[in-house]
Image: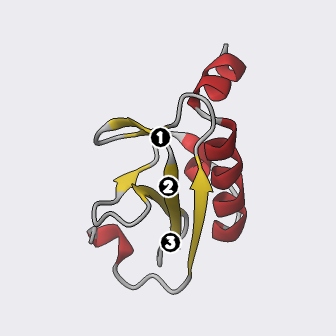
Amino acid sequence: MSDDRAGAAEQWVDEVVAGPGGAMTDEVGVVTGDLTLRTTARSGGGALVEIQYTGAEEWYRLTSGPHRLEATPHAVHRAALALVRAGYRAQEQADG
C-alpha cells in the first residue's frame, strides 16, 4: 500500500466497466474492461483514487481526474466512477 493511505478512515470501493478508451493511470497508462475503483479519504484531507483490473492485486492511481476537486472524498469517488464509465476518450474530447 501507498504511504498516502496510512491512517485513512473512510474508503469506497465499486466495480465499474470502463467506457470507450478506458481509464488513464499514472503507472501503466490506459486500463480497460472490468475494473474496481477505490477512493480513500486521506487523514490530512483530500482523497486517493486508485483503480485495478477486477480481481488483480495491483492498484494504480487514476490520472488527473476528480481527486483534485474541492469536495468530500465520497463525492470524489462518485465523480471518478462517472469518469471511468464515460471513458478516457470522452474525457479527452471534453478537455478539447
Q: Are marks 2 and 3 in contact (CB under 8 Å)?
A: no
Q: Quadrant of the rendered structure where residue 5 is?
A: bottom left
Q: Residues within 10 Å of mark 2 (few under 14, many from 20)?
A: many
Residue on which the image places disc 3:
40
Residues under labels 2 and 3: Cα distance? 16 Å
Circle 1 SS class: loop
Residue on which the image places disc 2:
35
- Residue 80 placed where, x, y %? 63, 52
In the depicted view, which residue is nearer to us: 15 or 79? Answer: 15
Q: Nearer the viewer, mark 2 or mark 3?
A: 2
Residue type at tag 2: Leu
Mark drawn on residue 32: 1
Q: Name the residue: 51% across, 66% down.
A: 38
Label whose residue precedes the other's in the sequence (2 or 3): 2
Q: Nearer the viewer, mark 1 or mark 3?
A: 1
Residue type at tag 3: Thr
* Left or right, 46 with reference to 24: right
